[in-house]
Image (spheres, grey):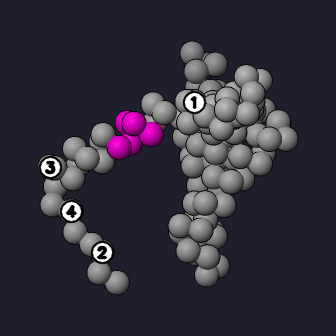
Amino acid sequence: MESIVLSYLKAFLVGGCICTLAQLLINYTKITAGKILVCFMLGGVVLQAFGIYEYLVDFAGSGATVPISGFGYLLANGAIKGAREGLLGALTGGLKSASAGITAATIFSFLNALIFKPKSKIN
C-alpha cells in the first residue's frame, strides 16, 4: 500500500510541477498557450534525445508521460528505437509509438463534436 501511495505522490509532484511551470509562463509572460505547448513538447523531445527524460519517466511514471512533454518524449523515443532499423524507421518510429494516443484523441474529438455543438471562441 505504501508503494502505491508513493507512486501517486511522485506522479502528482512531477506532473504538478510541469503544469505549474506552464501556468506560470501563461500568467507572467506574453507567450501564448500554443507556443508554450510546442516548447514543452519540443522540450520532451530534446530531453529524451539526451536520455534525461527517461529517468523522469522511471521516477514519476504517468506524472511525466501524461503532460505534453511526455508526448515529445514518446515521439523521440520511438524515433530513436526506429533508427536502429534505418532512416525510414527513424522517420516512422515516432508515429508508430504515438499512434494509439493520436487515434484515440482523433476519435474522441470526433465523438465529442457529434454530441456537443462546436462553436468558435469569441475573443
Q: Which residue is mark 1?
A: 97
Residue 5 location, quadrant = top right
Q: Where does the image place residue 91, in percent across and percent down from the top left?
A: 65, 38
Does residue 16 show up magenta in the picture? Answer: no
Main secondary structure of the magenta stretch: helix
Task: Name the secondary structure under disc 1.
Answer: helix
Q: Is residue 117 above or below residue 76?
A: below
Residue at the spot 39% in from the left edge and 36% down from the top edge: 103
Q: Is residue 21 above or below residue 26?
A: above
Mark nearest the camera among 1 and 4 is 1
Dot 2 or dot 3: first in sequence order is 3
Residue 7 location, quadrant = top right
Task: Name the secondary structure under disc 2.
Answer: loop
Q: Where does the image place residue 114, in percent across and percent down from the top left?
A: 16, 49
Spatial separation of the CA atoms under disc 4 and disc 2: 10 Å
- Left or right: 73 as drawn, with respect to 23: right
Residue at the spot 14% in from the left edge and 49% down from the top edge: 115
Label 4 Cα crowd, 10 Å radius (few <14 / some 14-19 / many 20+): few
The amino acid beneath tag 2 is Lys
Spatial separation of the CA atoms under disc 3 and disc 4: 9 Å
- Left or right: 67 as drawn, with respect to 103: right
Q: Quadrant of the C terminus?
A: bottom left
Q: Which residue is mark 3?
A: 115
Which of these two is toward me, 15 or 113?
Answer: 113
The outermost residue toward the right is: 50
Q: Which residue is mark 2?
A: 121
Does residue 104 show up magenta in the picture? Answer: yes
Q: Which residue is mark 4?
A: 118
Label 3 Cα crowd, 10 Å radius (few <14 / some 14-19 / many 20+): few
Which of these two is toward me, 110 or 5?
Answer: 110
